[in-house]
Image (tube, rainbow, N blue to C red):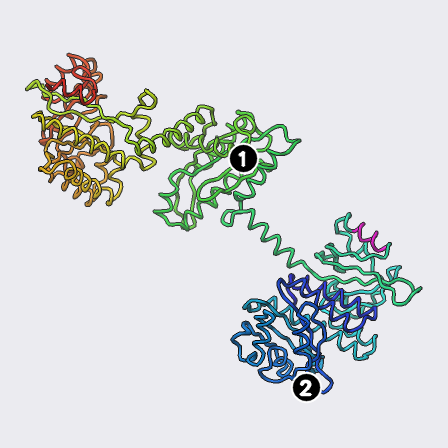
Amino acid sequence: MIEAESQQISLECYSKVLSMLLDGAELEAILHSLVIAIEGQQDATKASVLLLSDDKKRLLSGAAPNLPLAYNQAIHGVEIGPCVGSCGTAAYSGELVIVEDIHTHEYWQDYVELAKSFNLRACWSHPIKNRSGEVLGTFAMYYDTVKSPSAKDIQVIQEAASLACLAIERSRALAFQRLTSHIFEHLPIALVITASDDTVLSYNPAFQSSLGIHSDVNFSHFSLQSYFSQSDPVALDHLLACKAKGQTWQGELVATRVNGQSFHVELTMTALTLKAGEQVSYAWLFSDIDERKQAAQLIKHQANYDFLTQLANREHLFGQLKHYIEADDFTPGFGFMLMDLDNFKQINDTLGHDKGDELLIQVSQRIKAYISPDALLARLGGDEFALLLPGVVQRSKLIAQAQRINQCIADAFYLSDEKRIFTSISIGIARFPEDALTIEQVLNCADQAMYISKEHGRNRYHFFTQQMQADAERTAWLHNQLKIALEKEQFELHYQPIMDIERNRIVRAEALLRWKIEEEYISPAEFIPIAETSGLIVPLGNWVRKEAMKTLLAFVEQDIEIGFSINVSTFEFWSHSLQDDLLASLQETAIELSSEPFPFHLITLEITESLLMKQHTHLLDALNDIRALGVKVAVDDFGTGYSSLSYLANFPIDQIKVDRSFVRNLDVDPRQQALFEAITRLGQSLELGVVAEGIESRQQLELVTEKGVLEVQGFYFHKPMDQQALLSVLK
């Protein structure tokens, strides 16, 4: 069975050649039209038909309108044989000859210079044979580049040779009726010829097969309304109008077999008049393109739907969003939800991606069961879904829908191995046109709202607000400003002293990063998280340590020996390479700043409790290597994170800094006093130094010292100050 795409080529060629045959055209004209038709279907080809001479020894010019005249003249009369170019060899062997590169192929040794002079590089030649296998000539396709044929190319050249064969045989005085009968019998495309009153004059076996007509049935009437009743009425009316005017019509229709089964056809209707004054008859040439249609539908489906879940994909969703946004008559607006499964990566990592895919399928099916038929559910990729709700903009309706989705996803899922798992989903909601006016804005607004749902505990929904947009814009602006500030070193360090109560002196100062934009200080609580999530925290941390070490050396040169505490973000310990880089940067900075041994014993690096959870061997080794320099390690904000007593006992640290939250109500809450005392005794029992932060009153100081804590820090003594102010205090 000819493939659908090739049928399209064959249909045009057959239709044209058939018309010329029935009109009694000359062989030269038929071959010329055939060559032109094939060249029109095959990009960059120049086709040629050569006819075998009566003595079967030489090839004569038949039709090659786009090959150079001089070339045609040069090969006219060439004797056939082995290694006589592509056509001479094909005529001699009776087989298809493929020459991908004329310049190097043995068949073209005697003709390569001729081909070069006309920029001919590849030539494929097919023998033209009649039914008995007798060679009548060759059909060739030339190219100006090295080229090998595809399966479609070979099929086209074979069909072209077959059509040329029909024309040649007809030209050799075969009876017209015999030739027409032969075409009818062997044409792989359905053909029926009718009179003006739709009486069937003749039809071929392919037509019988297409419509499912049994060979023993006397088929005598061809009814357009009957056989094409399921077609597009507009197309059918146009066909009838062309038929009435005696004009040719070509297009696609839906035909119906005698058993009622429908199928798509590509039809060419041509009005025929054999002799002047005779009644007009019609040739109906059509091919079954159902497979091509099904393939096209499959391609369309694959282009618009997700392979795994069969939900709409991103492209289809965007198309629908664009439709509703640009529609002049769509005034109600729409609701849009962006949804992301919570902790899906953990499921993938622990159960495997196949189970993750299974969960995604079940999630999509469960959500579909809880939405209206006119809603569009899409999978955007990974574990991210989107829901388009046309006409739904009321908060109450959107809330109800989001709650249904949250509840249905919270129920247990059962995978194929009967494993029961739980998950949840975070939802961000945006509305058109209330929140956004473009596709990008709708997605961005819903994404911001979903991010808030994630931040606030997951398994919940949030509506987009203008404050979210303002926060997002400020975050983006600060991120950009951070990059600029790093390049230009537009930061400064302030220092807050740490007091030794027993000796009544400043023993250390904590280096605190400060950043000013246009005379306004940006809170570290705002820009440090941005630096951490963007990766800028690493170069920023290096800058802080280098500046603090510079200040330390400056104080030492003035015989002021004071320690500095420097905060280190957990993100700077995120990987083995970063852990190694931290140690290396301390050593390199020390060498850069001083030729003398650096007083590392005056530096304390403050880490957070969350780092205690990462008891990887490489991390422990890195911290031990840092301590080997003389640097001390303290746990900052102790008591507020996820620390475990076992972690605390095994971790290489020297101090703990009790968070200010335990000091704040120390003078009014006995339970806080008990908790503070327990933390203090824990540190002391592990032989760790204990520092109390946030001392703001005399009473807090007395309570802290009563518990045995002798190093304190807070506004009661000093607020953070710049380097010069600290130097003045120390002097």
Q: Which of 32/209 is in front? A: 32
Q: Which residues are magenta?
A: 236-243
Between marks 1 and 2 in the image, the one whose residue lies nearer the viewer: 2
215 in magenta? no
Q: Which residue appears farthest toward the left when viewing the image?
A: 503
Q: Quadrant of the C terminus?
A: top left
Measuring from the top left, give residue 721's x and y in whole percent.
Answer: 20, 20
Residue 106 visible in the current orientation: yes
Q: Residue at x 16, y 24 (%)?
A: 509
Per the picture, the main secondary structure of the magenta-coloured stretch is helix
Q: Residue at x 11, y 35 (%)?
A: 600
* Callout 1 secondary element: helix
* Pointer 1 or 2: first along the chain: 2
Q: Is residue 346 left or right of residue 679?
A: right
Give the residue type at disc 1: Ile
Instruction: Check the image and report above or below for 85 versus 673.
Output: below
Q: Quadrant of residue 58?
A: bottom right
Measuring from the top left, give residue 493's x and y in whole percent.
Answer: 23, 26
**Residue under label 2:** 57
Marks 1 and 2, how far apart in space?
71 Å
Residue 682 visible in the current orientation: no
Q: Is residue 74 left or right of residue 195?
A: left
**Residue under label 1:** 439
Instruction: Check the image and report above or below for 629 versus 223.
Output: above
Measuring from the top left, give residue 589's x and y in whole percent.
Answer: 18, 38
Q: Which of 357/3 is in front? A: 3
Q: Which of 465/306 is in front? A: 465
Instruction: Check the image and report above or below for 422 versus 179.
Output: above
Q: Residue at x 40, y 39 (%)?
A: 423
Mark 1 Cα within 10 Å, few/some/many (few <14, many 20+)?
some
